[in-house]
Image (cartoon, grey):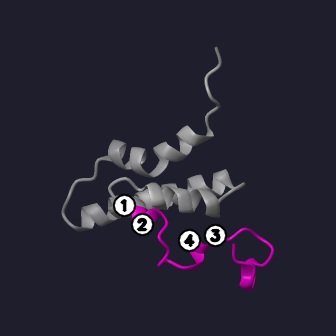
Amino acid sequence: MVRNGPSRGRFVPRSLSSRASAGAGALARDGSGDGARLALTIEFEGHSVALAFYLASSMYEAMDDTLRLGGLPDPAALHARFLGWAMRSRRAPPTA
C-alpha cells in the first residue's frame, strides 16, 4: 500500500502506483496466473471490492489490446481469467 502523495491515508495498491507490477498483467501473460493471483490477493487483502474493480479494468484493457492487435476477444474466457478466480474465492463453502 502506498501512503504518500494525493492519496495519503487511502488504500492505493502498488499495482496502481506502478504499472510495472506483476499484477493483472501477469494474469494475461501467464498460463496459470497462480503467482499473480497470490500477489494480488496479498496486496488487496481486506479490499475485495477494490480488487474486483482493478481486475475488471485490467480485463477491459486486455480486450482493447486484443482488438488493437486485430484479434477478437472472448469475453467469457477473459472474465474467467481475470474475475472468475476472485469471485470464487469470495464465495462461502457449501454447507451440508
- Up the image or down, 7 lies above or below 88; here it is below
* The quadrant where residue 50 appears: bottom right
* Residue corresponding to mark 2: 25
* Residue corresponding to mark 4: 15
* Residue corresponding to mark 1: 28
Q: Amino acid at mark 3?
A: Pro
Q: Amino acid at mark 1?
A: Ala
Disc number for residue 10: none
Q: Amino acid at mark 2?
A: Gly
Disc 1 to disc 2: CB gap under 8 Å = yes
Q: Is residue 47 magenta?
A: no
Disc 2 to disc 4: CB gap under 8 Å = no
Disc 3 to disc 1: CB gap under 8 Å = no
On the image, the x and y values in percent for residue 45 come to 68, 57
Q: Which residues are magenta?
A: 1-26
Structural distance between the alpha carbons of marks 2 and 3: 14 Å
In the foreground, 24 or 10: 24
Structural distance between the alpha carbons of marks 3 and 1: 19 Å
Structural distance between the alpha carbons of marks 1 and 2: 5 Å
- Answer few, some or many: residues within 10 Å of disc 4's Cα (few below 14, many 20 plus, some between 14 and 19): many
Structural distance between the alpha carbons of marks 4 and 3: 5 Å
Q: Earlier in the sequence, mark 2 or mark 3?
A: 3
Q: Is residue 88 left or right of residue 69?
A: right
Q: Earlier in the sequence, mark 2 or mark 4?
A: 4
Query: Where the N terminus falls, by quadrant?
Result: bottom right
Q: Is residue 21 magenta?
A: yes
* Residue corresponding to mark 3: 13
